[in-house]
Image (tube, rainbow, N blue to C red):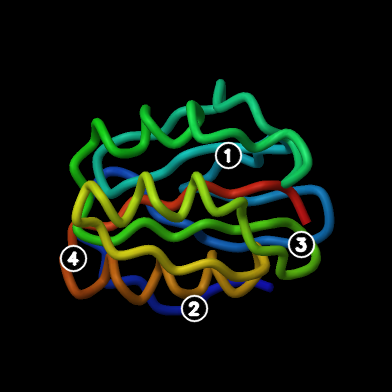
Amino acid sequence: MHFAQDRNTGSYAIRGYGPGEIRINEEIYRESLVISATRLSTDWPPESMAELRAEHIDSLLEMQPEILVLGTGAQLRFPEAAILHRVQSAGVGLEVMDTAAACRTFAVLASEDRNVVAALMMI
């Protein structure tokens, strides 16, 4: 899916996504990544929900988001209770959804200039 309109005023914007790839600005990425309006990191370790641990969330929380969007791959999968607790304890809103929905949600929230971080596992 490609996005036609972009109101994101940050440096990084999701322009499209599909099986095995996410297009940010004009680059295509094929690995798990973390994106905010001002930061892009392609060295986020978990490639699947089976690999996601509470420690992986710490780097996301250090970015001090208002909302954390977690894209869980092709299907919605909920994280372990320890992860939910860690995010809740930090006072950060957490939205968990499949990665396609997470890409769309990030785009909308970023266009509203919300302080959002998305951690996306490949579709």
What is the number of the mark on residue 27? 1
| Mark 2 / mark 3, whichever is N-terminal | 2
Label 4: which secondary element: loop
Circle 1: element type = strand
Between marks 4 and 3, how big is the CA–CA gap? Answer: 24 Å
Find residue 76 and report its image quarter: bottom right
Whichever of callouts 4 and 1 sits on the residue coming sooner in the sequence is 1
Question: Which numbered disc, 3 or 1, marks the residue that appears first in the sequence?
Answer: 3
- Could you tell me which residue is drawn at 55 percent across and 27 percent down? 44
For the residues labelled 4 and 1, the Cα–Cα distance comes to 23 Å
Q: Nearer the viewer, residue 36 or 7?
A: 36
Q: Is residue 17 above or below residue 12?
A: below
- What crowding class fits label 1: few (fewer than 14 Cα within 10 Å), some (14-19), or many (20 or more)? few
Q: Earlier in the sequence, mark 2 or mark 1?
A: 2
* Marking on residue 114: 4
Q: Which residue is mark 2?
A: 4
User: Quick one: label 3, few (<14), some, or many (20+) residues within 10 Å?
Assistant: some
